[in-house]
């Protein structure tokens, strides 16, 4: 099979030790794809299989219709809204789902919380300019101990972050679905009476919701306005959870006081003048939640295992197993 791995921004995938396992198959890793459909088609037209790096590559019906050779999409981690699974099924393309770990995104979330709380980037920039312990806006940092950490959605990542909060002596307040709140209560965490209480009481609100049709743009300007002027909103989940423009307007209005972001509505963000990147109360990272060696090894081992199984005639971990009944692409 000819296997393409698109949108490897850093050239990191080619450094992974998968080559020996893929003998007999042709694997090509390519950099960032152009947004124009014709260019994307030209890059991907020869692929029998695509191995996707999380949600970087959008695969919709318009693209699939012009890739008649494509038989398999092997996803690193879980399949999300970036892949039109219904179109894949209709066109005879199998979609295999991988595995993931909550550790790396949870650790990055905590690194962002610590950095903003102690104003690390501001002090670093001042030190590089020859200013020792310079105290300007936003002033002194503060400890996390004794403060309230609000977590929206108590899934695997949310559970890790809650554990970090407990270890740092924070009061952890959870909100989410019924099952999410029930598990958090069993683990000994307080449950918010509603989203209003989560935003009003928390010194830090960390979002860990999945992006669905129901959660898209669900967090509104009214929600953000409930946060205090010294509170921090952390989003390492999906930017589309927040209504367009609501976060920037809220920051300009002073509630919340700070934001730490690892996700953006349109990625990659290549405009150095993006207002969120330039905002003095925003700490931004380029979607690094899963971007580290251990996660990459885990993701790609599973993704290539799925490719090998498909090539051997024993497909597994398909989210659309009904596609096997079609003979549109063989």
Image: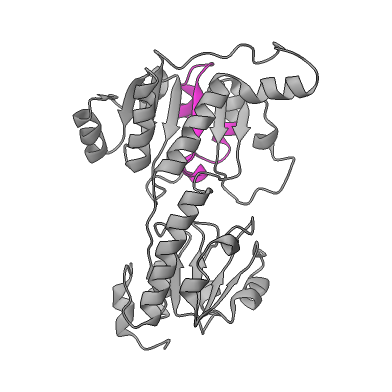
- Residue placed most toward the observer, 61 or 147: 147
Taking the magenta stretch, the answer to whether it contains residue 228 is: yes
- Residue placed most toward the observer, 290 or 204: 290
Q: Is residue 193 visible?
A: yes
Q: Position of residue 271 (x, y in %)?
A: 72, 46
Residue 193, placed above or below residue 11: above
> What residue range appears in magenta?
222-248
Q: Tell me the residue at 64%/15% (across/down).
A: 138
Q: Is residue 60 visible?
A: no
Taking the magenta stretch, the answer to whether it contains residue 238 is: yes
Say left or right for 243 vs 96: right
Q: Tell me the residue at 38%/61% (across/down).
A: 98
- Residue placed most toward the observer, 230 or 122: 122
Say which quarter of the image contains residue 328.
bottom left
Q: Tell me the residue at 70%/40% (across/down).
A: 274
Residue 96, placed above or below residue 123: below
């Amino acid at each position: 099979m000819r296997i393409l791995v698109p949108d490897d921004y850093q050239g990191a995938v080619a450094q992974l030790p998968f080559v020996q396992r893929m003998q007999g198959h042709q694997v090509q890793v390519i950099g960032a794809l152009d947004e124009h459909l014709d260019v994307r088609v030209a890059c991907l037209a020869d692929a029998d299989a695509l191995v996707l790096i999380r949600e970087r590559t959008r695969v919709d019906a318009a693209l699939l219709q012009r890739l008649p050779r494509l038989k398999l999409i092997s996803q690193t981690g879980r399949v999300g809204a970036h892949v039109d699974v219904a179109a894949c099924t209709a066109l005879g393309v199998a979609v295999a789902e991988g595995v993931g770990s909550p550790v790396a995104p949870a650790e990055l979330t905590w690194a962002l919380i610590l950095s903003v709380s102690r104003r690390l980037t501001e002090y670093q920039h001042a030190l590089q300019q020859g200013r020792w312990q310079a105290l300007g806006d936003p002033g002194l940092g503060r400890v996390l101990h004794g403060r309230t950490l609000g977590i929206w959605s108590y899934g695997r990542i949310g559970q890790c972050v809650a554990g970090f909060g407990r270890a740092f002596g924070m009061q952890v307040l959870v909100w989410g679905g019924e099952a999410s709140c029930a598990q958090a209560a069993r683990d000994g965490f307080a449950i918010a009476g509603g989203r209003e209480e989560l935003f009003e009481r928390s010194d830090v609100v960390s979002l860990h919701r999945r992006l669905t049709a129901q959660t898209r743009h669900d967090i509104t300007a009214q929600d953000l306005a409930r946060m205090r002027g010294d509170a921090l909103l952390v989003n390492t989940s999906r930017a589309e959870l927040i209504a367009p423009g609501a976060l920037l307007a809220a920051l300009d209005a002073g509630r919340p006081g700070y934001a730490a972001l690892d996700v953006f509505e349109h990625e990659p963000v290549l405009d150095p003048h993006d207002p969120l990147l330039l905002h003095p109360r925003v700490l931004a990272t380029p979607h690094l939640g899963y971007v580290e060696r251990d996660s990459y090894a885990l993701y790609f081992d599973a993704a290539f295992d799925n490719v090998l199984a498909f090539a051997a005639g024993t497909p597994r971990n398909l989210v659309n197993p009904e596609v096997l009944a079609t003979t549109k692409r063989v």
